[in-house]
Image (tube, coloured by chain):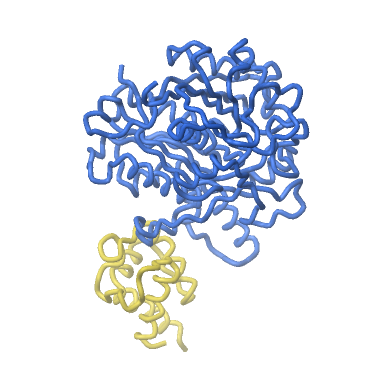
Chain colours: A yellow, B blue
Amino acid sequence: MQRDEIKAALKHLLVEGLRLDELTPEDIDDRAPIFVEGLGLDSVDALELVVLVEERFNIQIPDEEVGKRVFSSIDALTEYVAGELDHRSP
Amino acid sequence: MRRVVVTGIGSVNAFGAGVPCFVEGLRSARCAIGEMTLFPADGYRTSRAAMAPEVDVTGFVPPAARRKLSRTDRMGLVAAREAWSAARLDDARPDPSRVGVAIGGTTGGMFETEEWYRRRVGGEVSRLPASRLLAMPVHATADAVATLLGYRGYRLTIATACSSSLGSIALAADAIEEGRADLMVAGGAEGHCRMTFAGFNALQAVDPEVCRPFDRRRAGLSLGEGAAILILESEAHARARDAEILARIGGYGMSADAWHMTAPDPQGAGAALAMRRALDAAGLAPDDVEYVNAHGTGTPQNDPIETRAIRNVFGLHASRLAVSSTKSQVGHCLGAAGAIETAATILGMLGGFLPPTVNLEEPDPECDLDYVARAARSRRIGVAITNSYGFGGNNASLVLRAADA
């Protein structure tokens, strides 16, 4: 899976999965923080997004430390997902 | 001591969203009890229920927060917004730390929790969406109203079964009287859920057809849902900001039957005690009361017992009282019932009419009061009392007075 495909899938997941009805995937800034400022999401949304990402890509976000880093922006999240998928590829 | 007044009302019930729908429904003596449409109701004693419309919070709740609300929360929020605007508080910008919230209910976001469980057990979802369970507790509605509308003062959730929201209004009035808040956003919200629907069916507490309070053929209640929110403040506070006073809170009384988990005390002693205490608190004599908005569920037990309690409290004056059951029109809205019926009483006072008891065609000889059967009646009233009795023997009565009474 290419990075831009992953990025598009993540944005779609955010909008659809967290039902951010008034947003389109194009509205989401790649570098802006996902939580608090930016999209106005909170710690409960974070819990859901972890589940959504893990299920969608069949990967694990092992702990809060990793979580904090990878959910800092769409770019960071894309890198993490891409890295995990690369590890798995033969 | 501060005198407490009502300056705003918001309403959602089976007549629709908004006070005008409620007034029209009460006046036209329609019965809004239809069929349960939220979930399949086959195989139960009845599929009858009064359904509120889906209400939209899009305009004032951000998308991420919307997903976490239950239907109960949405109804409470819409009613609170309406009440706030009606009290002309939108531009008043009161100190948020002096605005309190007191909301009653019985099951909060139970329906959404049941939906999650159904989908999880059915294999539709494999992991837990946390946000769907956060709306489950009964305090979630008061939290949502306070958080999303920005009220940072005194906060209460009252859960005394079907007297919950009358208790909320009563304790909100105390908060104003005691100076704990300048404004209270008070009432109740209740959405249907399977647990309650199945429970009342299993108890055979529901009428297979629409409920018929005080009728000889009555066979139980009809479940309803909705929300009603009042804005309470001190008379001085209302006058200082030139707000229109819709009604005054006379006083309230509470009592417990200490009798049975679901059945009322057959002598109606607890019900009578709550009414007497409310009159005492209001400094009124029984003869001062003109109208009783009854608990009036339509169960075989409640109606004659409540009638007896009214006769005990009011003596000979009972025959001159008008008594009616708003539950005959919008169903029994459980945790929201007390607030909805308080709103009905005030709207009747304001509109110069007595809300009716519909579906009452053959009066039960044991129910021998004037129940305003079948049609609303034109009459301007100054003093009314509304009753709410809950499972477990939770009794509450509230005296309401017209603004000029």
Viewed as shown, does residue B60 lie left or right of B360? left
Judge whether residue B160 can be spotted in this image: no
Quadrant for the C terminus of chain B, please.
Answer: top left
Q: Quadrant of residue B61?
A: bottom left
Outermost residue, front side: B378
Q: Position of residue B315 (x, y in %)?
A: 61, 10
Relative to A26, residue B366 above or below: above
Q: Residue at x 42, y 49 (%)?
A: B78
Report the number of numbered marks.
0
Between B284 and B40, the one lying in front of the other is: B284
Closer to the camera in the image, B290 or B108:
B290
Residue at (47% x, 25% y) in the render:
B381
Residue B97 location, quadrant: top left
- Which quadrant does the N terminus of chain B fall into? top left
* Left or right: where B12 falls relative to A22: right
Frontmost residue, B310 versus B30: B30
Rendering quarter of residue B321: top right
Please name the residue shown 54% across and 36% down the image. B337
Q: Is residue B35 above or below residue B239?
A: below
Q: Position of residue B211 (x, y in %)?
A: 69, 39
Q: Position of residue B54 (x, y in %)?
A: 51, 56
> Is residue B257 or residue B215 the one in the foreground?
B215
Q: Is residue A35 visible?
A: yes
User: x, y (%) of residue A60?
Assistant: 44, 70
Residue B29, above or below B119: above
